[in-house]
Amino acid sequence: MPTMLVLVSASGGGTAPVVPVVGAPAPMLMSRSVSLVKAFYARPETTATVPPAPGALQIASPPPTGSVPATAPGTTTLATLTSDVSGSAGPGLAPGTTVPASWYGYRSTLPVIDQRPGWVEVRLAQRPNQSTVWVPANRVTFSSTPYRLVLSLGAERMQLLRYDQPILNVPAGIGTVGDPTVTGHYFVTMKVPPPDPGYGPFVLATSAHSDTITDWARSGDAIIAIHGPIDSHADALIGKTGARISHGCIRLHDADLAQLGAVPAGTPLDVVP
């Protein structure tokens, strides 16, 4: 079954870069003032209510230069880049890569997983999967999120936690045996408009990339996203127990996907066996 490929442009005007999310037949374009989304359907690849919690993205007051603000228990510190930053394999080491300030036209907001005086280690949106890099703390803006997503491949269910407390647990459509949803530690990179109603109210692109597909529909990549079921057949297959129906993307019933509307970019996503 197809996974989804999402293409997003930087800002108004010009040719939109492609956000290659795994999953559907011929790509379709949908324009928007600040983005352009391209996606693929996935053939045979919906419901709880969680009020959008206020303060989904909690921005701390500006900390002293180069320091990381303290966060409440059950939250994740986020680092937002305001310009391209040189990243290193360790604090103070020679730069080895450039971390872009935007990813397919959306601001790079990355989860912080470790810190040292003047430095933070962040996860990256690029391949290889689960890549991390150290960047100077004075080159980013800090905020935090109380949310975390956990996808269990064995249970075929997606869980949303807030302050480490489960608030949503719903069936999910996941990758097939041939094109599995990759396990590991990832994060939400952006929320983009759906290419058509089948993808639900929005699409959440993630930092996970398919291990079996490297170039979906000649887009240059195959990014795993969270989106709607695509069609009524897939919706029925997901049902109440979940199903292995996609090329790696995570499909939710529209009503369940809508409950993730407050989840900001940078929110951790753990995919477990």
Image (cartoon, rainbow, N blue to C red):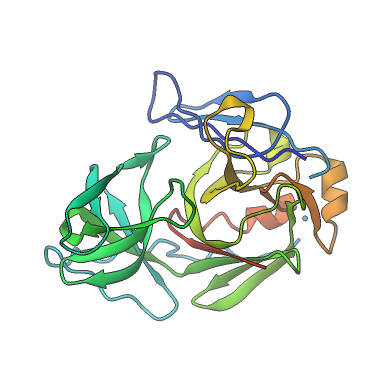
Name the residue located 68 percent from the left edge and 43 percent from the top edge: 200
User: Looking at the figure, which quarter contains the N terminus?
Assistant: top right
In the depicted view, which residue is nearer to us: 22 or 74? 22
User: Looking at the figure, which quarter contains the C terminus?
Assistant: bottom right
Name the residue located 47 percent from the left edge and 60 percent from the top edge: 267
Name the residue located 73 percent from the left edge and 65 percent from the top edge: 170
Name the residue located 74 percent from the left edge and 58 percent from the top edge: 172
Q: Determine whether, in the image, residue 176 is placed left or right of residue 224.
A: right
Residue 56, placed above or below residue 228: below
Q: Where on the picture, by quarter, is residue 256?
A: bottom right
In the depicted view, which residue is nearer to us: 47 or 74? 74
In the picture as drawn, the residue positioned furthest to the top comes out as 14
**Residue 272 location in percent, x, y?**
63, 68
Residue 83, placed above or below residue 17: below
In the picture as drawn, the residue positioned furthest to the left comes out as 65
In the picture as drawn, the residue positioned furthest to the bottom comes out as 73
In the depicted view, which residue is nearer to us: 155 or 259? 155
**From this viewpoint, is residue 174 visible?**
yes
Q: How many marks?
A: 0
Q: Determine whether, in the image, residue 248 is placed left or right of residue 116.
A: right
**Residue 27 location in percent, x, y?**
65, 25
Q: Where on the picture, by quarter, is residue 201?
A: top right
**From this viewpoint, is residue 48 visible?**
no
Residue 202, placed above or below residue 38: below
Q: Determine whether, in the image, residue 44 is placed left or right of residue 8.
A: right
**Residue 75 location in percent, x, y?**
42, 73
